Amino acid sequence: MSAKEEKLLHDAERILEENWKGKYTIPSPRLYPHQWSWDSGFITIGYSNFDQGKAQKELLSLFEGQWANGMLPHVIFRFENNYFPNSEYWQIEISEYSPEAKTSGITQPPAHALAAYDIFKNSGDKEEAKAFLKEIFPKILLFHRYLLTKRDPENSGLATIYHPWESGLDNSLRWDEPLARIEVKDLPEYQRVDKDKVHSDQRPSDDDYDRYVYLIEVMKKCSYNDEKIYDEIPFKIKDIVFNSILYKANQVMLEIADVIGARNDEIKTWVQATKENYFSYFSPNGTDETLLYDYDLIGEKRIVKRTAASLISLCTDLLSQDQAKRIASWMKHSHICKESCVHEHPVFTSISVDDMQFNPLNYWRGPIWININWMLYEGLKSYGILDDAENLKKSVIDLIDEHGFYEYYNPLSGEGLGADNFSWTAALLIDLLSEEN
Ligand code: 9WN
């Protein structure tokens, strides 16, 4: 490891140390003062490379928020803090399934099995790691069962999301049309606090926030009952990123079941169902189409927007080699910053730079995110597109080295945006730097 990389590793570990709260890690001190679900997954992957104790605690503490029906909430509130929506606003006690912990009432992409298995793979004490897997496996299984039953009455092997926050890519262009359809009424008074901390150019619009709040109001009216929500909620999407991660997570669950000698028949049926339906939901013209898109259940159509979401299928083994290569070559000309690019090799943007709505500053509507690039790196490697994978890794390292540990980055200048000292940026950099060549 070069001196530069050693310093970066040290800085990344320091950020995680600063954001560590005894048994979990906050995404960033200023903007996100609680525990977030898929953040915890990525953060655990980082810890698994250098601190197994923290890695295990991070994941186990997250599941303290799990609901009795298996739902894993997207936020656990440990203490009151300046964040909207706070625990009081969610009113989860109206659900018969809510836990004692204070949580939100919606979920986030299921990256946790990947994190659990990384703990095992990176552990020097396999027996101890196996004991951890035995403890976490039934909890993750319960979550996946919730996603593939309550969130999939169609039996498609693909879970439905009810809220843009469930996608993790909150104000993605993909949600513009489904959100525009929503008629917002009887909105309670609420106060955004995010814009006091980060410039509003970099955050979702007030119109988006009204819709975010309205969707939660609908869920509350349904007492967070999935059957009722399915009938009432005006936003229901088979999200390609969420489901690519879920499919991968189920494959990893099969590996974990093997290690601990657990039953795997139910997981096998989920994997099979996803395989059978992935392309019929996500591909406009069958398996040959290069780009795949989310499916809008209410609009009854695919959401054809050129965003990084269409690249995330690379994280599954469902593409043909030819299709994977076409996606890789498409993203190299469409998802980079071209002449003004600050790096020799591309770091991929959250939407195509050719899109009329490309915005270099605004959140998921243009900027570079490290978790997306980390997933693309893993995907490129899995399809043997190794030169592109290596170039991507170098560029991610350079970007963080030059601009710091931010939540996202301006693709035209490299400038860090959103929250600083951002945990998953640090954790996933640690994962990249710890990889054996
Ligand atoms: C809402 C914590 C979370 C991430 C999401 C990211 C952002 C929250 C917000 O921050 O969402 O959940 O307030 O904008 O979009 O992916 O998990 O880092």
Image (cartoon, rainbow, N blue to C red):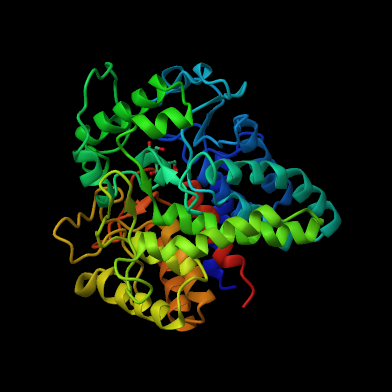
Task: Please provide percent x and percent y for residue 28.
Answer: 46, 40
Q: How many labels does the image show?
A: 0
Quadrant in which the C terminus appears: bottom right
Task: Decide if residue 382 is in sight here.
Answer: yes
Residue visible at 29% across and 66% down?
284
Q: Ligand 1: which quarter? A: top left
Name the one closer to the observer, 334 or 324.
Answer: 324
Task: Please provide percent x and percent y for residue 345.
Answer: 35, 76
Residue visible at 19% across and 39% down?
180
In the displayed structure, would residue 189 be above or below residue 290? above
Residue, far right:
127
Name the one closer to the observer, 387 or 420.
Answer: 387
Name the one closer to the observer, 434 or 132.
Answer: 132
Task: Decide if residue 84 is in sight here.
Answer: no
The quadrant holding residue 248 is bottom right
Does residue 262 appear to the left or right of 178 in the view shown? right
Residue visible at 47% across and 55% down?
243
The quadrant holding residue 124 is bottom right
Residue, far left:
356
Task: Please provide percent x and percent y for residue 122.
Answer: 71, 62
Task: Please provide percent x and percent y for residue 310.
Answer: 35, 63
Residue visible at 55% across and 51% down?
111
Quadrant in which the N terminus appears: bottom right
Does residue 61 appear to the left or right of 194 in the view shown? right
